[in-house]
Structure formats: structure tokens, C-alpha cells
Amino acid sequence: MHVPMWIKPMAWGVVVGAVGTMVVGFTWMGWTLGHTTTRLVAEGRESAVVAALTPFCVASYMKQPDAAAKLAVLRADTSEYTQRDGIEKSGFATMPGNTEPTSGVASACVTALRTASLAGPGQRVASDGAGATTR
């Protein structure tokens, strides 16, 4: 059987075109594989849960009777591990209905508590630029 001469260049053109389309699609057009999409969705879901539960953790921490003193101790500690571990052990990162703390919530809670203000509603807190606050 005689194969026409134009078949070989056409076959190479199809192969090169397919590879080129895949390279352009995955690098510039945002194509992803199924497992990558699943991983990205799971990461997004986790970050949404952390963002939603962090205010609950901060509010619970601030409701303590001696919140100002404990907040000063938390801010004085420079180890992120011990800060997060303290939040987890005290139960502020354990959401109602759960038995285990969420480490992502604990980390976000520590970050939020570093910048939290003890001023109640209606009180203004002014910063002097050096980190100290005045009322």
C-alpha cells in the first residue's frame, strides 16, 4: 500500500500542535488537572473556615476576666509556637461541637490578638507611633 507523501508532515503537525496547545493552556490559560483543582478547593475551604472562626476565638479570649494581663503576656512571648500552643490548650481554638482545636484558627487568632485593642465600643484609642496607646 502506498502512503501519500503529505501524511508524514501532517502527522507531525498534529503532534506539534497538540503539544503546543497543552503547553500554552497549562502555562498561560490556567488549565489545571483534577487533583490540583481538588487541592485548591480544599485550601480555599480551609482558609474560609479559619477566617470565619478567628473572630470567635478573639472574642472568647477577650471575655476572660483578666484579658488585659493575659494579652500582655501573650504579646511578650516571642515564640509563635508557644503562643499558638497556649491558645490551643486554653480551648479558644476549639469550636463548639469539636473535641480538637484547629491549628489554623489558633494561628490566625494569635495574629489577630497581637493587634487587638482592649478598648470597648465608644472608646477611642490613639497610637503614638511607638506602639503605645492612649485613651
Image (spheres, rainbow, N blue to C red):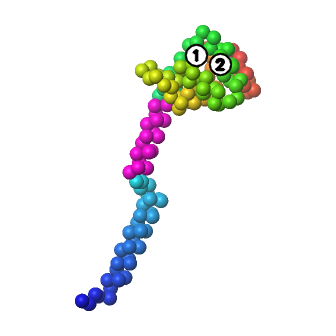
Q: Residue furthest left?
A: 1
Residue at (46, 22) in percent of width and height: 99
Q: Which residue is mark 1?
A: 62
Residue at (68, 30) in percent of width and height: 79
Magenta span contains residue 25: no
Distance from Cα at disc 2 to Cα at disc 1: 8 Å
* Among the two numbered marks 2 and 1 on one chain, the one whose residue lies closer to the N terminus: 1
Q: Rate crowding at label 2 as few (under 14), some (14 to 19) or many (20 or more) other CA atoms within 10 Å.
A: some
Q: Residue furthest bottom?
A: 2
The magenta segment = 34-50
**Residue 133, horizontal then vertical, whole percent:** 71, 20
Secondary structure beneath dot 1 equals helix
Give the numbered dot on residue 110. Answer: none
**Amino acid type assigned to the residue bearing label 2 in the image:** Leu
**Amino acid type assigned to the residue bearing label 1 in the image:** Met
**Residue 132, horizontal then vertical, whole percent:** 73, 22
Q: Are marks 2 and 1 in contact (CB under 8 Å)?
A: yes
In the figure, is residue 108 to the left or right of 17?
A: right
Q: Which residue is mark 2?
A: 71
